Image: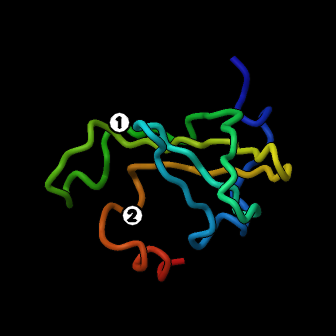
C-alpha cells in the first residue's frame, strides 16, 4: 500500500480556505467539488484519498445528542482538468460539530 501523496506533506491552499472551496451533489447522492479558480463551477477530480486521522472514541459524543461510532479525518487530493489547479481538502467528524457556516469562518 502506498502512502498518501507519496508521503509528502499536504495542506489545502489559501484558495480553498475561508469558504473558497464549494461543491454540490449532482443528480444522485455523489458529491462534487468545484474548482476555486474556474468561474464556471468546473468539477475537480479526486485523484487520491487517505486516512489523515482515526480515533477509537469521538471526543464530541459527550457534547452532542447524536453519537459517532469513532472519530476520523479523511483527506482528498483534488485536481482540475481544465486549469490544472491541484489542492487538498479534509473531511472530518472531529472538528466543528454544528452551527452555521458563518460561525466557522469567524474561527479562522
Instruction: Judge from the rendering whether residue 48 lies leftward or rightward of residue 28; answer left or right.
Output: right
* SS class, disc 1: loop
| Residue closest to the far right | 84
According to the image, label 1 marks what residue?
56
Could you tell me which residue is drawn at 33 percent across and 61 percent down? Answer: 97
Quadrant where the N terminus sits is: top right
The colour scheme used to paint the residues is: rainbow
- Image point 38% across, 49% down: which residue? 93
- Figure quadrant of the C terminus: bottom right
What residue sits 72% from the left and 28% below the top?
3
Q: Secondary structure at mark 2?
A: loop
Structural distance between the alpha carbons of marks 2 and 1 = 18 Å
Q: Earlier in the sequence, mark 2 or mark 1?
A: 1
Numbered disc total: 2
Depth check: give the residue in front, 92 or 19: 19
Relative to 87, 52 lies left or right: left
Q: Position of residue 76 (x, y in %)?
A: 63, 42
Name the front one of labels 2 and 1. 2
Q: Which mark is residue 96?
A: 2
Q: Position of residue 42 (x, y in %)?
A: 69, 52
Residue 84 point in image, percent of width and height: 85, 49
| Nearer the observer, 45 or 62 | 45
Left or right side of 54 for 43: right
Disc 1: CA contacts within 10 A as few (<14), some (14-19) or many (>=20): few
Amino acid at each position: 500500500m502506498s502512502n498518501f501523496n507519496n508521503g509528502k506533506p499536504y495542506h489545502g491552499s489559501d484558495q480553498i480556505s475561508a469558504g473558497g472551496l464549494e461543491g454540490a451533489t449532482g443528480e444522485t447522492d455523489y458529491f462534487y467539488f468545484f474548482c476555486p479558480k474556474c468561474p464556471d463551477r468546473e468539477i475537480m477530480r479526486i485523484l487520491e484519498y487517505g486516512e489523515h486521522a482515526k480515533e477509537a472514541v469521538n471526543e464530541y459524543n459527550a457534547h452532542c445528542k447524536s453519537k459517532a461510532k469513532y472519530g476520523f479525518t479523511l483527506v482528498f487530493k483534488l485536481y482540475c482538468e481544465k486549469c490544472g489547479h491541484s489542492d487538498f481538502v479534509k473531511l472530518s467528524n472531529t472538528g466543528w460539530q454544528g452551527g452555521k457556516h458563518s460561525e466557522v469562518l469567524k474561527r479562522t
